[in-house]
């Protein structure tokens, strides 16, 4: 009977060691995985918001020429016939 109690106590101690300090499924490892999962969820949410913005921009580009013209004006410097383009260059005074 004493031998059975000893083995049960030894087995319980082994399970407790694995629970607190083990490599597979220990409490610190679970906490680390939960932290990593929370970070990944934040990244996914950021990507979803970015995708929504891109889908809205894509819908604008497909719906009409105003969005295309706006991008061409700001990114490529497009001007219409009869318009005058002014470029203002600012410089700091020399010392």
Image (cartoon, grey):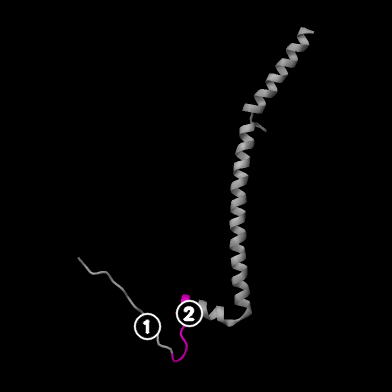
Tell me which residue sits at (59%, 53%) in the image.
Answer: 43
**Residue position marked by numbered label 1 in the rendering:** 86
Q: Inspect the magenta stretch and tell me whether residue 6 lies in it.
A: no
Q: Is residue 26 above or below residue 8?
A: below
Q: Is residue 13 above or below residue 95?
A: above
Instruction: Residue 36: give x, y in percent of width and height.
Output: 60, 44
Q: Quadrant of residue 18?
A: top right
**Which residue appears farthest toward the bottom when viewing the image?**
82
Q: Is residue 92 above or below residue 81?
A: above
Q: Quadrant of the C terminus?
A: bottom left
Instruction: Residue 68: give x, y in percent of width and height.
Output: 55, 79
Q: Quadrant of residue 88?
A: bottom left
Instruction: Say what secondary structure mark 2 lies in.
Output: helix
The image's mark for residue 73 is 2
What range of the chain is rendered magenta? 73-82
Tell me which residue sits at (64%, 32%) in the image.
Answer: 27
Query: Would you say the residues marked 1 and 2 are in contact, meaning their CB atoms lie under 8 Å apart?
Result: no
Of marks 1 and 2, which one's residue comes earlier in the chain? 2
Tell me which residue sits at (66%, 28%) in the image.
Answer: 19
Tell me which residue sits at (62%, 59%) in the image.
Answer: 48
Label 2: how many Cα within 10 Å (few below 14, some 14–19, many 20+): few
């Amino acid at each position: 009977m004493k031998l059975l109690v000893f083995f049960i106590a030894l087995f319980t101690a082994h399970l407790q060691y694995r629970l607190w300090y083990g490599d597979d499924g220990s409490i610190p490892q679970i906490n680390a995985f939960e932290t990593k999962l929370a970070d990944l969820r934040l990244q996914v949410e950021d990507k979803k918001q970015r995708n929504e913005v891109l889908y809205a921009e894509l819908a604008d580009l497909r719906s009409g020429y105003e969005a295309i013209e706006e991008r061409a004006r700001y990114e490529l410097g497009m001007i219409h016939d009869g318009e005058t383009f002014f470029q203002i260059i600012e410089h700091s005074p020399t010392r």
